[in-house]
Image (cartoon, coloured by chain):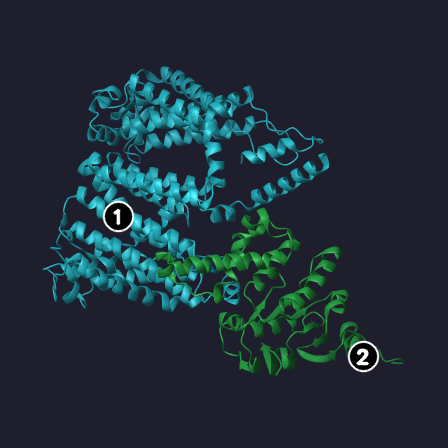
Chain colours: A cyan, B green
Amino acid sequence: MAQTVDARQALPERELVPSPPVDLGAAVKWGLIAGMTAVFVSAIGMVQAFEVRSVVVGVDLGYLVLFGAALVFGYAAARPGEQLEGFLAPERGVRNVAAGLIAGLVGGAVLWLFVLLIGAVDIRSVFPSVSPQLRDLLTFGRGAGFAAAALIGGFGLVGALGGGIPVLPERIRAPLVNALAWVLAFGLFEDLFAQIFRGAKVPFLEDLLYQPGGGLSLVGALIVFVLFFAVYLSTASRRETVRSRIATMSPSERRRWVGVGLVVAIVILAVLPQILGNFLSEVFDLAGIFLMMALGLNIVVGYAGLLDLGYVAFFAVGAYTTAVLTSPGSPRWSPEMTFVAALPFIVLAAAMAGIMVGTPVLRMRGDYLAIVTLGFGEIARLLFLSDWLKPYFGGAQGILQIPPLELGPLTFRSSLDFFYPIYAFVLVFAYVSWALQNSRIGRGWMAMREDEPVAEVMGVDVVKAKLTAFVIGAILASFGGALFAHKIGSVFPHSFQILVSIVVLVIIIVGGIGSIPGVVVGALILVGAPELLREFAEFRYLIYGVLLIFMMLKKPEGFIPSRQRARELHQEEMMQDAWLRKEEEAAAAAGS
Amino acid sequence: MPLLETQGLTKVFGGLHAIDDLDLHIEEGEIVSVIGPNGAGKTTFFNLVSGMIQPDSGKILFEGIDLVGLAPHQILELGIARTFQNVRLFQNMTVLENAMVGQHARTRSGPIRAILRTPGFRAEEEAIRRKAEEALAFFGTRLIGYRLEQPAFVLSYANRRRLEIARAMATEPKLLLLDEPTAGMNPRETLELTELIARLRDEKGFTICLIEHDMRVVRGVSDRVICLDYGRKIAEGTYHEVATNERVIEAYLGTKAVEGV
């Protein structure tokens, strides 16, 4: 993007029009939204529930959420609009701060009205959380008059701070925002960081950063802030050069660096569970199993463009095949094989399932395909649940007594042990995804995704390509299922709800469809984070939902998008970039 | 034996005879233009030959093999590649990737070899890339250099048309079907492409069949012109023979009003 800015400056100055200033009227609208958000989180009991959780020096999470609304919407109100072709860069200054201030004041006023309302009318029958304690919390225990000043003033102040963010020069802004985000992360995920410090044998860091009652101490917050601010500030200029160096690397040089990166990744993965301990390893194991499935679905949906909503069926096939072959408790037939001996049969069963699902849907596209595969997913679950197959799969009672995973002399029992086989498979699958993407078959899938009839006319055998995608996706998911069965020690039909398919799909969409790093990040965030936020009970799904909606609105290509996907969603901008480049070339040619 | 021959080819859409009992042939090494008013069935003819739709009756013989019933990718493998009237590139793939897809049917590596990165696979990838670049280089510097890594949708309109031809060339066809290759191009680009079409035959040895509305292009490149109307062949011969044919003029301009009525 930096290139774009340069190109704009290089353009001849011809009647550029000033950009419209920040709309103060719209700031009122943002303020109303901020106020409504604050009222909403109060009314559903979030503020109260979070009150007990101190994040940074006594500031509890409840107030943080409340005033966070002012910050976020203050920023939103003050954000300058996009710079359009032929316009000057929008001015940033007092007006932005004023917009943030207005948004904050309006938001505070709305919340104050809510305080007045719940003082006058009892709405507890509808909102059980709207209790006198909430009122105490919102008035800071000092009555409505103080609340008016504190809420409106506080919101205004925080809103103005939010409005000030866009005014800061870019060089300061990015490190500041990042450092603040890190402080917040350290406060929120205290358990995670404390465990890491203990595991890494540096427990004094825990005492240094956190105060005894929970939450970052003042010193801790300052250390984290200064550290990350310094890191981001000092690396900002270098990151750009590193990026351009990577782009210009020769293939052999790049391969060497990839090798180095791989070794580093393996070392980190080797020591990670030791640092994380059992509980956090469990979280990562779960994320890893979803990650295996997500990498598989990424091939089907991301590469080949076949929207499969019944993906859990393959996961179930893998888990049940493993259970039948390895468990002594298998109802009809129990060969009690080891995992290694069972593996070929698991692959075979998954491949057959892939072909069974793939063949009838060969001629379907898009929505129709999604609906049919959705049905297949449910059929698989119902079959395992049915009385008809109960003699083989145990019906609702499932199959128990699946032995722990054995690989040669090694036995994996605890969550800590399981980390290794799971992430070993994840590494292999990530490689497989990469290898397939950069190959003849990968290009065939991409072409099919772009325009199926044309791909066929250009020589891609779409029947073969589709079935290959389904089969490979099925095999990857079945490995996830096999490890899941060994890890849990039992399989039940209710583990294979439609929700699993949806979560896996959401992982790849939020992470970035077709992008391997994106899928990894997506799985860790969407499966790992909710586990870490378990203390927030039911609210975590609210946060989860807000995150998803935000992502889809603001970054539909995902956290780490694939190049292709980013292009697809930002065609307009890229066209403009190309146009600017041409313009620049013309200017250069005219100048020389 | 002609390279391509149709016998009694018929395709009916509802009650409309898009192609009606069509017999024509294309000899190896020829450049044949198919002309005709809008709705004459020219593109339907291409769709039938490339296997995108199936005829209701008749035969399409390519080197003596009947193409009816074959899948599009099988027809491509036999050596027929085409372009589209309304440019249909793989928009979000790069210029190079678009051309590389053309090699799909000429190569064999499956997923297992891709995962194991066998020497055979690497050599094949290298060959695919080389052939794709070769096809792109046919258009001079317009599609190579930094453009190789650009997504297809940022290309100018004329370059998209060129890339579509390059993608078809990369499939190493014997017969190239070009559907209005100069549509939407400016006169200079049209002239350039007219020369290129001749070079495609002379240097690359493709037999070419093109649909074209621009009569300067048709006159410039065609060995033989076939005029269709209502799915039937109404004239065939050199450009001048067809251009002066009564029925052709009638098809384009309508019948003369009978005087005195």
Residue A476: x and y, percent?
30, 56
Q: Quadrant of the C terminus of chain B?
A: bottom right
Question: Gap between marks 2 and 1, in whole Å?
Answer: 76 Å
Asked which quadrant contains residue B174, the reply is bottom right
- Could you say whether the residue bearing mark 1 is in a helix, strand or loop? helix
Is label 2 on the same chain as label 1?
no
Residue identifier under label 2: B246
- Closer to the camera in the image, A192 or A23: A192
A197 or A256, which is in the foreground? A256
Q: Chain of mark 1?
A: A
Residue A305 seen in this snapshot = no
Given this view, does label 2 or label 1 mark the residue nearer the observer? 1
Q: Quadrant of the N terminus of chain B?
A: bottom right
Q: Quadrant for residue A297, please give it.
A: bottom left
The location of residue B172, given as percent across then percent down, is: 55, 67
The residue type indicated by label 1 comes to Ala
In the image, residue B259 lies at what x, y percent? 88, 80
* Left or right: B35 as drawn, with respect to B109: right
Q: Residues within 10 Å of mark 1 (few under 14, many from 20)?
A: some
Q: Amino acid at mark 2?
A: Glu
Q: Is residue A468 above or below residue A24?
A: below
Residue in view at x 57 percent, y 58 percent: B134
Q: Residue furthest left?
A: A328
Residue positioned most to the right: B260
Q: What secondary structure is marked by label 2? A: helix
Pinpoint the chain carrying mark 2.
Answer: B
Can residue B16 be seen in this snapshot? yes
Q: Position of residue A30 (x, y in %)?
A: 48, 30
Any mark on residue A424, and which?
1
